[in-house]
Image (tube, helix red, strand yellow):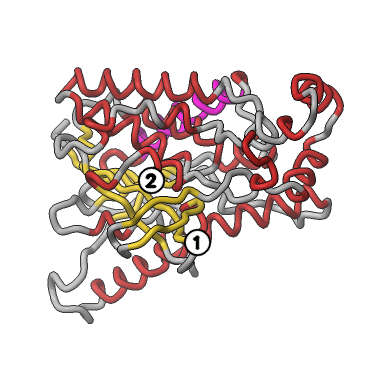
Amino acid sequence: METKRINLALQGGGAHGAFTWGVLDRLLDEDWLEIAAISGTSAGALNGAALKAGLGRAEGKAGRRHARENLDWLWSQVSEVNDLRLDRWVSALFPQPEAINRWIEAFAPAAWMDQLTRMISPYDTGPFYINPLEHIVERFEYEHVCSETGPAFFVAATNVRTGKIRVFSGKEITAKAILASACLPNLFRAIEFYDPQTGQGEAFWDGGFTGNPPLFPLFGPELPRDIVIVNINPLYREGVPKTPTEIDERINEISFNSSLLRELRAISFVRRLISESRLAEGAMKDVLVHMVADDKTMTGLGAATKVTPTTGTLKRLKAAGQVAAERFLTEHADAIGQRASVDLAGLFG
């Protein structure tokens, strides 16, 4: 098959990002598929960094092999984090942290643990605070993550002061930028550092609040028209949530999909203007949207699994991602470069 270029947009969703691991693992098998750019938020930023570091390290099959190895390493490390809500920093509040961890794991239901993280701020832990992702993110090969070789890479975070999205690229992408992209404020302290864009110190929270993932960095004229979104937060969920847990889960899904839906609506509007010849030729990019998702699998998982990255769940999600990518390639590979495989008009009709 002739070479086809795509941009990847990788959603965040905590441990559910292992689904994206599976999708990328399968896409890397296709030599004809060239990844021109990656936009990632939260878990999508971690997946994107691992992918970019591998593809930026070497060309061709060697780069794909490095990327796959990086992704395997990333999720092997994530699997060692028992629970992002309580691991290390909450237990450190107690005089015998090992004992309280065992008690929590044995007896505490997920809903009780969720309530605990709402009652205790990560700032309450004083000198005991540790971000469990830091030791993973700091070990990325940033000389390759930030390299001009390989796909362009964009990481989204939310500026706490302004409430606006901040997209990092190139040399701006540091361990702090990726940690900022994955900083849920009820779990982790804000990531603070000097931002040359504003000329002052800034604090950042998870990019999912403002761009999950952002699509606009992928509109550059040098990039291909096709954007493949790897979606891990279900767009649709049948029935009305009734229990507190179900309500919280659906609120989480809706809020973390809202920025993506806004951008998709804008793309749909521009495409309609282009099709009706109401825009001058070349005035706006005619973006072709594709999506790899598995809402059936994701709706079968609770929100608690996003912050409890057990090995079994991660492996199941990786396998689901591989199957979803295979289905996408079988049904829509021929659409890449030719037409969109997501019916945006129908989505917003």
- Judge from the rendering whether residue 309 lies leftward or rightward of residue 6; answer left or right: right
Find the magenta span and give its range: 313-331
- Judge from the rendering whether residue 114 lies leftward or rightward of residue 347; answer left or right: right
Horizontal and vertical percent position of residue 32 = 19, 30
Which residue is situated farthest in the front direction here? 127
Residue located at (32% from left, 44% from top):
8
* Looking at the image, residue 35 lies above or below residue 250: above
Most frequent secondary structure within the magenta stretch: helix
Q: Quadrant of residue 102?
A: top right
Horizontal and vertical percent position of residue 318 = 50, 25
Q: Nearer the viewer, residue 186 or 6?
A: 186
Q: Secondary structure at mark 1?
A: loop
Residue located at (33% from left, 56% from top):
195
Q: Earlier in the sequence, mark 2 or mark 1?
A: 1
Determine if the magenta segment contains residue 134: no
Mark 2 Cα within 10 Å, few/some/many (few <14, many 20+)? many
Horizontal and vertical percent position of residue 177 = 38, 45
Mark 1 Cα within 10 Å, few/some/many (few <14, many 20+)? some
**Picture disc at residue 177:** 2
**Picture disc at residue 314:** none
Disc 2 to disc 1, how far (Cα)? 14 Å
* Residue, disc 1: 160
* Looking at the image, residue 283 lies above or below residue 75: below
Q: Amino acid at mark 2?
A: Ala
* Looking at the image, residue 200 lies above or below residue 133: below
Q: Amino acid at mark 1?
A: Val
Horizontal and vertical percent position of residue 306 = 61, 37
Q: Nearer the viewer, residue 304 or 296?
A: 304
Q: Secondary structure at mark 2?
A: helix
